[in-house]
Structure formats: C-alpha cells, structure tokens
Image: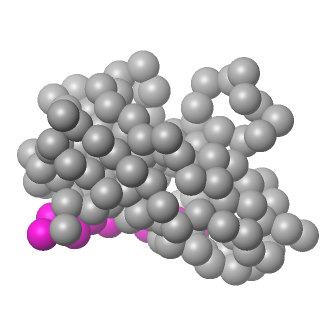
Amino acid sequence: QVQLVESGGGSVQTGGSLRISCMVSGLSLSDVCMSWFRQAPEKEHAEREGVAEIDYDGQTRYKDFVKGRFTVSRDNAKNTLYLQMDRLSPDDTAMYYCAADVNCLWGGYFAPSGMNHWGKGTLVTVSP
C-alpha cells in the first residue's frame, strides 16, 4: 500500500524559511517522479498548483514563481521528499501536497491529473 505523509508545515513571517517533508512508503523514491503542489485557502475549488518536481534521476524543475526560493530534494535512504522554502511571502500561504507520478509520464507538466498518489497535505501560513 502506497502512503505519502507530509509534515513540517507551520506559521512563519514574511521573509522566513520552512522545510516540509513527505515520508513515502510502498514506493522507492529512486524509481519514481515526485512533485509538490499547493492550494491556497481561498482557491479550494481551483486545481492544485504545481510547485516543484524531482525525477527518479534527480533532475528538478520549478515553477517560475518559486525559482530561486524553493528547493526540492530527497533522501533515498529515508525515502523522504523535502521542500526547502526560503524568502516566503503571504502569497505562499497554502496547503502543500506531495504527489507521485509512478511512471514518470508527466515531467514538466505540473499536472495534478497525472499523479497516481497523494498525501493529505501540510499547511504553510506566511504572515505579513
């Protein structure tokens, strides 16, 4: 059974940093492609927004609005995915989700519909 469990969310002030994690079981991170998505509280009816991706071979991709501020990484030994978020702003306030694209079919598309497995999310709140 595949499980993705996010943790590490919380409240920070503008300009602060936070690292969130996604512990994965039932899949090996070295075999799959992983993504981070987010959904702002006021956009709960909108599609989740792609943030960052990391492929099975370690290649990473970012949406423009987080380039230079966010870093996606993984620890294969711990089978855990990370998202380091720096220089946070209130616009980054959202529920953050990790997701797995088991066959790596959707690299670069940041497409929620292409993901096979999702975590339940961790909330990041950035105050002015």
The dominant secondary structure in magenta is strand
Task: Give the left or right position of residue 9, taking residue 6 as reference.
Answer: right
Q: Where is residue 13 drawn, in percent x and y?
A: 79, 76
Q: Where is residue 122 drawn, in percent x and y?
A: 56, 53
Task: Give the left or right position of residue 49, taking residue 108 as reference.
Answer: right
Quick one: which residue is furthest to the front in this view? 1
- Asked whether residue 65 is in view, the answer is no
Q: Relative to 90, is 49 above or below?
A: above
- Asked whether residue 48 is in view, the answer is yes
* Quadrant including the C terminus: bottom right
Give residue 15's quadrant in the image. Answer: bottom right
Residue shown at 53%/61% (left/top)?
Answer: 67
Residue shown at 59%/63% (left/top)?
Answer: 9
Q: Which residues are magenta?
A: 68-77
Instruction: Decide which of 95, 83 is in the foreground and name it.
Output: 95
Give residue 14's quadrant in the image. Answer: bottom right
Q: Where is residue 24 drawn, in percent x and y?
A: 26, 51
Give residue 34's quadrant in the image. Answer: top left
Q: Where is residue 78 drawn, in percent x and y?
A: 19, 68
* Quadrant including the N terminus: top left
In magenta segment, residue 60: no
Q: Relative to 61, is 13 above or below?
A: below
Q: Relative to 89, is 116 above or below?
A: above
Residue shown at 85%/68% (left/top)?
Answer: 127
